[in-house]
Amino acid sequence: MAKDIWIGDVQNGDYDGQDVELKGWIKRTRGSNKIRFVVLRDSTGIIQCVAKRDVIGDEAFESIASALIESSVVIRGTVNVDERSEGGHELVVSGLEIVGPVDPERPFPITESAMKAADGGETEFLLDNRHLYLRTGRMTTMLKVRSSVFGAIHNYFRDLDFVEYQAPNFVAGAVEGGSTLFEVPYFGRKAYLTQSWQLYAEAAMPALERLYTIAPSFRAEKSRTRRHLTEFWHAEMEIAWATNDEVMHHGEGVVRHIASTLLEERSNELQVLGRDLELIQRYADTPFPRMRYDEAIEILQGKGVEVEWGQDLDYSKEKILTQDFTVPHFLTHYPKIAKPFYHREDPSDGKYVLCHDLLAPEGYGEIIGGGERTWSEEEILARLDEEGTPKEAYQFYIDTRSYGGVPHGGFGLGVDRVCSWLSGADHIREVIPFPRDSRRVTP
Ligand code: ATP
Ligand code: MG
């Protein structure tokens, strides 16, 4: 039962006047005892189909009239150009077949507005029925934008000869600190779900020199925020012989490439989501300014925010700082005390590390964290000691320094966060099909 005609192509005018067979799902129906208007949806668009009893006969007419929303159907008919119809075309129905009916005992309010109404302002109903919510126009649009974001990241790195590289998801040690580690039983021992690909990528850096991935990372984030998931998609890169500046150059490069890819591939979707395309164009075109951490602290203190030098900036502070930004900004040179051992000390001032965060405007905040890595054996041992981090789990990581270490660096980009920002979502869970947070692992 292959499908070879897509509603999007019909609406593009590829089949005007032709007899076609369309396959899809019923989105809406209305009409009388003599004529029914059925809006058919597939993954590429919608089209209104007009069925008349005296043309298709009683049996087919009754079957279409009784079909519930979301029934899957095959509809045959002739494509008419019709300015008044949504999309400019309609199908004059000659016959139809219901392929997958909807359980009449459990009809479902599948439209966006009906689902929102059934939800009563909470989001639990939408999340409980996520498998059906995916079919709504807004979510389908989000998923298409998301697909283009993933494609853009792959293209950016592959065009520059980066090698895609995979790391294990079961690991023995933390990257981002113990408080967000997921512990899993592992044959009588403890293992953890990875928080980042980075340490294992650094192990392959002497082999591949330029590598990247897009993979899930896991963090037991207890507080529920608009920008944290417990399982998120992490685009990470690692590059040999590179400075913090060069790593930032790629962070900026990939983000601007994502923006320009969306303009090319998903302008319609962005507009459906209410996005101003000029804004996205600006993100694609404008260089991202750089600011040192110290300067950010001064700005915040100038705005009356209580923040002390040495603190990592949480979201409440990022939000205030980014208020006046019109494009993403890099924040560099954080205090060493705010960052884990693998961040390289600034040789010109040991109070700082050579790192960066990229903060998105419009209140979205951090989308990238990266920097130069501590690369000499001597320094990595000293940093682990300073932190009091036990070395066993990191022995392989230390070894990579003992055998021909070289300067290198990399970053991690939160793909869901970038999707959320560029699509203008209110919450990160709007851009991922089955969001995971501290309260939910179902459906
Ligand atoms: P935050 O301070 O916002 O919690 P982080 O500094 O812990 O983030 P990093 O360890 O720097 O995050 O991870 C790199 C990137 O991965 C972040 O810039 C962000 O875009 C993304 N990221 C981190 N944690 C999450 C999460 N729980 N959900 C979604 N994306 C995340
Ligand atoms: Mg960070």
Image (cartoon, helix red, strand yellow):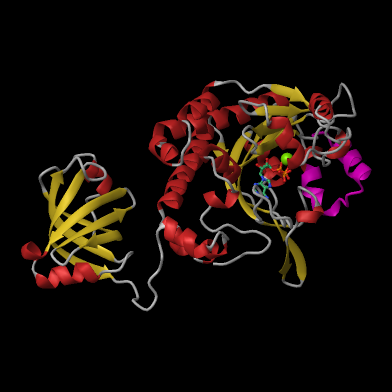
Residue in front for this viewpoint, 368 or 427: 427
Q: Main secondary structure of the magenta part?
A: helix
The answer to which image quadrant residue 207 occupies is top right
Q: Position of residue 379 (x, y in %)?
A: 87, 35
Residue at 69% x, 31% y is 322
Q: Position of residue 419 (x, y in %)?
A: 54, 42
Q: Residue furthest bottom?
A: 105
Say whether residue 276 is left or right of residue 29: right
Task: Report ligand 1 position as a quadrant.
Answer: top right
Quick one: quadrant of the C terminus? bottom right
Say whether residue 207 is left or right of residue 317: left
Q: Position of residue 421 (x, y in %)?
A: 57, 39
Q: Which residues are magenta?
A: 375-399
Whether residue 102 is visible to the viewer of this picture, yes or no, is: yes
Q: Residue furthest front?
A: 32
The answer to which image quadrant residue 344 occupies is top right
Judge whether residue 396 is colored magenta: yes
